[in-house]
Amino acid sequence: MSSSSSSGPAGNAAARVDDAVTVDADDKTVTIPPVAGEVALLMAIQDKLTDAPGVLPVAKAMSFFGEHAAGWMGLAALGAAVDADRRRGWAAVGASAFTSHAASVIIKRVVRRRRPHHPGIRVGVGTPSKLSFPSSHATSTTAALVALSRMGFGPAPLAGVPAIMLSRLVLGVHYPTDVLAGAALGWTTATITDKILGGAADAAPATSAGEGRTAQ
């Protein structure tokens, strides 16, 4: 297989060039395409981050949690079960994750962009499909985190948005525009879902005036 020729350091070094090159691998002649645009950016990000301590395990854990938005929907169900005062907000988290994921899958099947496949890109995790645009992980995670930020948790959850975007690049399963489009789609979906459900922020439990909160 030609892809196996890039698994080692020599394969990556041969792939990271500005012009197409031809190498011998497994008794076959393999032409490696030139590196440019998003491929070059993706490789640069991987070179910078992938081998840093802890980065790859965290990226894989985020991938597992966000697969098919299952982790976010499970968290929303648990939150709704134990936090009755904010049940509407937790419903918004689950609904945002589900609907945004579904939207991303539909768009993927229309656009049909192939996942990164240059031999110099290191792929660190399996994927359920070969379609790339937009990133469903970036979409559903952004949607869930936006919904969380609107139900009394403040802006802190939003720190996870760039984290999930970078994780998909570190794992080599998306191009930068895939994760950017996914984040935009997730944010939009969460905003629409919030309006449909009447405002997840309204689900934050009321506190007394003595606790420093005044009704607006």
Image (tube, rainbow, N blue to C red):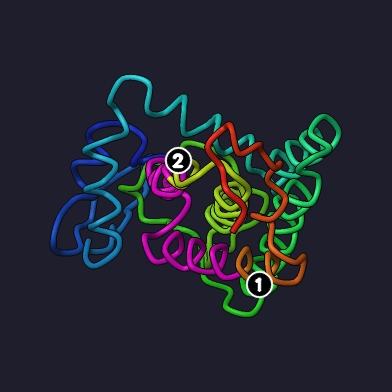
Image height of 58 relative to 167, above or below: above
SS of the residue at dot 2?
Answer: helix
Give the quarter of the image for residue 79.
Answer: top right
Image height of 182 relative to 206, above or below: below
The residue singled out by tag 1 in the image is: 192
Count of marks overlaid on the render = 2
Residue type (three-letter) at the residue carrying disc 2: Ala
Give the quarter of the image for residue 70.
Answer: top right
Q: Please, which residue is most extreme toward the bottom here?
A: 110
Please name the residue shown 62% across and 35% down the image.
Answer: 64
Please name the residue shown 30% across and 53% down the image.
Answer: 42
Magenta range is: 159-188
Q: Is residue 60 left or right of residue 189?
A: left
Q: Is any atom of residue 68 visible in this view?
A: no
Q: CA distance from mark 1 to mark 2?
A: 21 Å
Q: Please, which residue is most extreme toward the left here?
A: 18
Front residue of this view, candidates 1 and 203:
203
